[in-house]
Structures are given as C-alpha cells and as structure tokens.
Image (spheres, coloured by chain):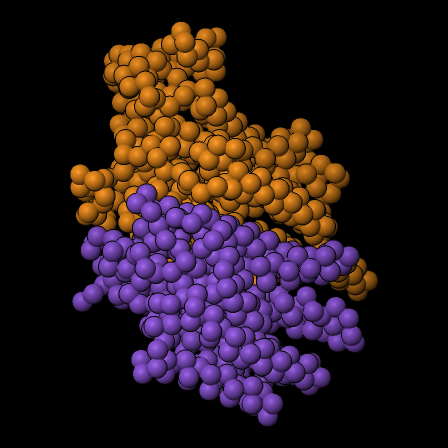
Amino acid sequence: MENLFAARAVFGMSLSFHIMFAALGVVMPFFLLLSQGLYLKRKKPVYLALNKKWTTAFAITYAIGAVSGTVLTFGLGLFWPRFMDFAGPMIGVPLSIEVMFFLLEAIFLGIYLFGRDKLSPWLHWASAIPLFVGGFASMIVVILANSWMNTPVGFEVNEAGEVIDVAVFEAMFAPAWYAETSHMTVAAFEAVAFAFAAVYAFGMLRGRRDEYHKKGLFLGMMVATLAAPLMIFSGDHTARQLAVNEPAKLAAIEPLFETTEGAGLSIGGYPDIEAGEVLYDIEIPTLLSVLSFDDPNATILGLNEFPEDERPDPRAVWWAYDAMTGIGFFLATIIPVFWIFYWRYRGVPTNKFLLAALTLSGFLGFLAIELGWIVTEEGRQPWVAQGVMRVDEGFSLAPGIGIAFIGFALLYVFLASTLIWLLKRISTGAPPEEEIEEAREQEESEDAYAL
Amino acid sequence: MPFDVILAGALGVSILLFALAGGADFGAGFWSLLARRGERATEQQQLIERSIGPLWEANELWVVVSAVILWSAFTPAFAAYGTALFIPFVLAIAGILLRGAFLAFRIEAQEAAPKAYRFFGEIFGSMSIVTPFFLGTAAGAIASGRLRLNENELPVDGYFQPWLGPFPIIVGILGVVTCVYLSAIYLTIDAADNEPLQEDFRLRGILSGVALGVLGVIAIPITRFDAPHMWEGLAPGKLASVLMIVAAVFLVASVGLLFLRRYWFARAAAILQVVAVFGAWAMAQYPYLLVPDITIQDAASPRSVLVAMSVLIVAYVVVLGPSLYLLFRLFKSSPSGKEEEY
C-alpha cells in the first residue's frame, strides 16, 4: 500500500473515530452538571437516575476518547513526521495546552466517577465543573491547531525551509481560529444534545412512557434548542471566514469553477471537473455573494483562479458540505415542531413520527460533525498546511504503514462494536432506584387517601 | 537561562511520572492476568480495579505530556523517533488503546455483562505488558546508539535493527518488571484492610523486586557492549554511577522492607529507586535526545516556543498539582488506613 494513502487513511480513520468521543467528552459533563444540579435543587429522583446512568456511559466514552486521543498524539509523529518536523513549534504550543486541560478533565473524571459516596452532594456536583472546563478548553485549543493548518501564520523560515522564528500567539490564533472553535463548540453541543434526546426518543418509540424517558428527552431537547439556532449563525460566520481566508475551500465546497461577480448559491448537483461546471444543481442567484460579503455584486473566486495542482477536488467535498448544511437545517426545523407538539399536548410528545425523527437526528448530528470535518480537511487539499506544505511532503516514509492502517481499522471496528454492545447492556431503561422511588411515592399517596 | 535544558528536564520528569503512576497501572494489568485461579482471585481482581480505577486515565496521560513537550520543544527528535521507531511505537500505542478501552469496559461490565468481564480482563491484562515493553525498547534504541540517521533523517540500518537488539530488549524487559514491581508494592498498601490479600502482593512484590535486581545485573554487561555511550556516562566516579548504586541500595531496601511488612517505607524506597535509575539514565544520556546524532541543543525549537513551553510547564504545575493532590487524597488511603469523608 502506498504510504501517502495509508497515512491519510489511518489518520482520517483515527480522527473520525476520536472526534465523536471528543464531542461527547466536552458536552456530557454539561449534562452531568445539569441533571445533578436539577436533582439537588428539586430533589426529584428521576434526575438522579439519569445522572447516574449518564455517569456510567461517560466513564466508558471518556476512556475511549482518552486512549484514542493518545493514539493521535503519537500518531502525528508516527504517520506525519515530516509535517510535524515543520509544524511542531507552531501547533505544539496549543496542543500542549490541550493536554494540560485534558489531564485536568481526567483527574476530575476520577474524582467525579468514584467520589459520589466520598464527597458531599454539592461538592460532588462541583467536581464536575473542572471536568467540564477541562473538556471544553481542551476542545478549543486543539482546534486552534487545526485552524493554523488552514490559515498558517506567525512563523519565519530560512532558505532551507527550516522554521527559525515563531510568533507564538499569532500562530496560536490564526485567522480561522474564531470561526472554527465556535463552529465546533456549537456542533458538539447540538450533536450530543440530539443524541441524548434520541436515546430516550427511541425508548419511547418502543413503548416507554415513564418519567425517566420523558425527562431524558426533555433535557436533551432543552440543550438542542439553544444550540441549533446558534448553528445557523455559526455556519454563516464560518462560510464568510472561508470567503476571506480560504477561498479555494469555499470554491470547492460550493463548487464554483469560474471567478464570478454576483455568484449564485449552488445546491446539490454534480461537479463535472472536465467541463468545469456543476450539472443538475439548483442555483439561487447572487446568494453566495450575499452570504459571503453582504453584497449581491461581490466577486467570489472560482477554482480556476488557483494553479491546477493546488486546487482541492470539489468531488471530495461538495456533497459533504451540502449534506452537512442540509442536516443543520433539518435539525433546526425539528426544534419548533417539538415545542409546538409539547405545547399542544402539554408535555413531552409521544407522536410516533416525531419520535422517529428525533431518533434519526441523534445520528444526523454526529454525521454532520464527520461531514464538517471532511469539508475542512479535504477542502484544504493538496495542502496539509495551506500554501506552506503539501500533504505529500508530510507523510512518513517508514514501511509498514499499510499494515498499521489495516491493524488500526480492525481495532476500531472491534472497539466500536464492543462499545455499542456494552452500552446496549447498560441502557436498561429506568433503573431500579427510580422504580422503587415511584412505588414509594404511590404508596405514600395511597396512605394519604387512607387517612 | 537555558530553556532547552529546562524543557529537557521537564520531559524527563513527565516520563518519570508516567513510569511511577501510569507504569504501575500497567503492572497492575500483569497481576490481573495472573489472578485467574485460587481462592482469592476474585478479590485480587477487585482490589486491582479499586486501586487503579479512579486514577488510570490521569496517570496514563503523562506519556502524552512527554509527547507534546518533545514535539513542541524538540521537534526534529520527535520526527526522528516517529520514523525510525515506527514499529515499537505503533505497537505501544495499540497497546494503550486496547488496554485503556478494555479496562473501562471491564469496570462497567462487572454488573452489566458479567460473562464478558473475564474476556475484557484478559485483553486489558495482556496489553498492559505490551506497552511498557515496546516503550522500553524504544528508549533503549534511543540511548544505545544503535539508531543512526542518514542525511534524509531516515534510519541507516532499517526499521528493526535499532530496537531489536540486546540493550533495547533488556530495557523493555526491565520496563515491564519495574511496572510489575511498583504495582505489587502499591497494591499492598491498597489492600491494607485485607490481610491475606496484602500477603499475596507482599510475596509478589518481593519476587518481582528480586527479579528486577537479577535483570539489572544482567543488564550491566549488555550495556557495556551494546550501549557504549551509556556505559561511559555510567563510568565509576561520575554522578550517574553514584545514582545507580543508590538505586541498587533502594531496591534492596524496598524488598527488605516488604519482607518486614513496612509497606509505606517499602513504597517510598521503590519510588526512590525508580527516581534514581531515571536520574542516572538522564545524566548518562545527556546531552543527547538521540545518541549520537541529535542533541538537546540541535533539536531545540526557536526561543519564543521554548519560552512559551517553559511558562506552560509552570501552568501545568499550578493547575494540575492541586488537582492531583485532591485526587490522591480522596482515593489513596492515609497511613492509618481509614477512609475519609468530605
């Protein structure tokens, strides 16, 4: 197997595996804080039952996130040593900060997981705050490293191409940083919130109607309701950033072949590379120019503007971009529908189609994260650091990368299937404590009648 | 102020912390693999889980700290290791991936899937040996001078020769046995409330301590002919050689203290033994990050990055120090053996 292909395959696979657990690792502590906080405030046992279950699930998903993250850390040196040799000083600093926050999260995970009986309830709740902060901050800084790859700045090279000086802060906050970090933050919250809602929607679809499922679904939708509309703004902001800082990527995802004044927004279709045009698409006139620069006559650079060997292939990204945006709008549409039903039926709706749509959205949110990641990475091709280093200058020359790729592919399949199997075993519906509590409440109310 | 040396020191400390904390957790995997039969096998498994459960993720992440210091501050060394030692490092990280995942699976499977519990434990246990062995061989290859780079920074003698040799392999084995030995001693303390269990690990600690001593003696002639630079660094009269003698004394002391059932002192001696060995190694290898082709100074990143990384090291201490203190305070029992409530 060719090394370049194998290195890209093994890294693409490892990242697409890790990114799901990274998103869970950032947002699940928020749900832990939320559910336990509600329990401590309102003393309703259903919140405690949810909190305990989520804690169990988080213990496993965090572990997978931590170990797959370790693989990536080493993997950068193993699969991309020549890229790291160049970029290490620039992206090393944010990644080192990332590891600090990741360790903070790991430490407080231990405290939170095993400290329930050792700490007072509020202190135990408070131990999830550094857990959340650690996960959140580590996500932000790790994306800073990615934004440097997309818009590399803040370094000086000599004639031999060696980095001789680095402006640490400039390199850390590359032009794309704000758009990328905010976009990923909102995406993580949206995807995980919908996944939480989906778990309980699926349970309800199978006939569960207990308080546990309703509250689980409700909490998921609360968070999703905050995230999904923000995503529309964040997506818009990100596309504007592309227009200014990464025009080749924007041209590829759209796709736009010729530089156009007052460019239209193309939806769907198929980019025909030879002919240099998009076939069978729907085009909304001037919308791309409006969305990018608030000006219907603004000029948008087309792919043909870039040298032939420096163009990303639109066929690798246009579908991912369209699908991601489509999912974004679908998820944003579900929210008002849910609340209309909620208002109409005075409670968590049990409509089958709605529950099915919610179950589906649990998958779609994560799918959108993967698609977005494909867009940002494939859209930068053939560069590993935009305009500075090509992917085919960065990969490892060591033999055996192909074997490593196959080995890791098998490992990830094995891990993922074991994980899914185990999570299914754990998701047993409302746990016993909850049932006991319900029974006790019923007893009490009956006693009250008897009196 | 030589920031490169400070960061090389921080790199050494992070590897040491990984060995003392994460390494012992890997050793616990070895003991879990052995705890199959016998009347106390289940109790031993539970002890291991209780002992490493809350801490293993934080403990293991020290190796990631080493990796990021290396790649930010000494990038060419990281690139050279990644290329030439691709095979041992890939095997080591595959071990980390499987071991961690299956430890987490196993902890949750105890209630949710008791039948799978044992199978998960076998993967966790066997992979716990793989990682320290291959990390040890990589360290051995780096220090031995077996790994030479050509002008394209590719290994002259291929991808096996640097680490498949007497010195790297004995270091790999020493790595595994050190983990196993540390773990047994830590477990005697965690088993304070169960005397037969404590006796089990006392015996195991003594045996693995003796094994470590024997292997250490075997390593001496191997170092002489397969790792000449290390051998010179450890020559009599140099501080590194004194540290090696100190390490030997602490090893004997820790085994003796185990025999006398002075567990807290035995643990302190064992930790000091590992610290002494690491100190001696670092001194003998100095100033090389890859003997004899890359020095700390050759590999150092631009000064601004070194300054930023040094500041960051201070932040690590300030942020993580108190957090770790809290974690250990909560889950590692005090000498009185009593559990505290907060």
User: In which image quadrant can residue A206 be found?
Assistant: top right
Q: Is residue B243 above or below residue A195?
A: below
**Residue B101 in the image: x percent, y percent?**
60, 54
Image colour for chain A is: orange
- Residue placed at 35% from the left, 58% from the top? B290
**Residue B322 in the image: x percent, y percent?**
40, 71
Residue positioned most to the right: A450
Residue A146 visible within the image: yes
Residues A89 and B226: in front is B226
Residue B8 horizontal side relative to residue A438, left or right: left
Residue A75 horizontal side relative to residue A289, left or right: right
Residue A67 visible within the image: no
- Residue placed at 33% from the left, 38% from the top? A149
User: In which image quadrant can residue B53 be found?
Assistant: bottom right
- Residue placed at 70% from the left, 40% from the top? A204
Image colour for chain B is: purple
- Count the numbered circles shown: 0
Q: Is residue A98 above or below residue B46?
A: above
- Residue placed at 48% from the left, 12% from the top? A269
Residues B154 and B11: in front is B154
Residues A298 and B71: in front is B71
**Residue A219 in the image: x percent, y percent?**
56, 46
Residues A10 and B89: in front is B89
Residue positioned most to the bottom: B260
